[in-house]
Image (cartoon, rainbow, N blue to C red):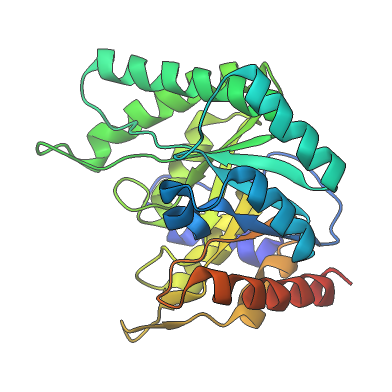
Amino acid sequence: MNRRSFLAVSAALPAGLVAAEPQEALPKKARLKPALCAYSFRRDLASKARSYEDLVRSCVEWDVDGLDMTVYWMPSTERAWLHSLRRLAYRCGISIYSIAIRTELTRAAQKDRDAEVENIRRWVDVASALGAGHIRVFGGYLRGGVTEEQAVPWVVECLQRGAEIAGGQGVILGLENHGGITARAERILEIVRKVNSPWVAINLDTGNFPQDPWRQMEMCLPYAANVQVKSEMVHEDGKRGPQDWDRVVKLVASAGYKGYLSLEYEAKEPAAAAVPRLLGELRALCRKYSA
């Protein structure tokens, strides 16, 4: 993160909150790898028209490096199945580098937040069995009149406890900009800074900021451990339309990001037709801006 970007982030944060520098010094050169997010084929996975094994094989066919594995349709969490999928991925030269789970860390009751932490513990074990070094988590929504100011300490507490668990197995938790408590970059940065752990970072979704998206993406990028790319976004005029991927990937590279750009496809065209074409475009841009 250069000084100009750091000052811009600091100026955008709530009064009295100073942005922390990224948690570790990494080489400046960007290293971008194209990946497929399993959520792109959510209908096929839900109907069992495709399996996770099919997605691994498709990653080879479509010449991408990784699978960002949304877990919602997994047939099992038994070690035999997880290890079988891990072996297939290794033999195919595909990294199952991340899994994506649901969490609701804004729950008011302590017992409910304890249950969320135990849920993270369960999925850390799954990620470890698959060889994944990252888990996408959600902050959660505000319910029953709860304010963001009330909920921030709850999210921080859950992530600090989750970080101890995840770090014990070498897994990073990536907090996604997914509405609710994480609708704005300023709040996400506040939470990540307060957690203050090398095992908690940001899972940046390039299609999830409804206002001022480019500024907010830039703010999050120095803390990003995974980037999920959308084919569409809400633009500055409030209208939804195609996302300028050249601009996205250039922005990601300018932050010195090293890691995967995962296509999370949600548009109307059938995924079977759109995803291979879009992955080809993403692959070319990753090569262009990694140079």
Residue 154 vertical position relative to residue 18 in the rendered view, above or below: above
Q: Residue at x 43, y 53 (%)?
A: 177
Query: Does 153 sit left or right of 1 as displayed?
Result: left
Residue 42 vertical position relative to residue 136 in the rendered view, above or below: below
Relative image position of residue 109 (x, y in whole percent): 21, 19
Q: Quadrant of residue 105?
A: top left
Q: Residue at x 32, y 40 (%)?
A: 140
Q: Residue at x 48, y 64 (%)?
A: 216
Q: Quadrant of residue 17?
A: top left
Query: Does 279 sit left or right of 220 as displayed?
Result: right
Q: Quadrant of residue 248?
A: bottom right
Closer to the camera, 61 or 25? Answer: 61
Closer to the camera, 247 or 118? Answer: 118
Work out which quarter of the rendered image holds the N terminus and state it: bottom right
Residue 208 vertical position relative to residue 114 in the rendered view, above or below: below
Relative image position of residue 262 (x, y in whole percent): 63, 58
Closer to the camera, 87 or 173? Answer: 87
Query: Does 43 sit left or right of 54 as displayed?
Result: left
Q: Residue furthest left?
A: 144
The reply to whether residue 250 is visible in this rendering is: no
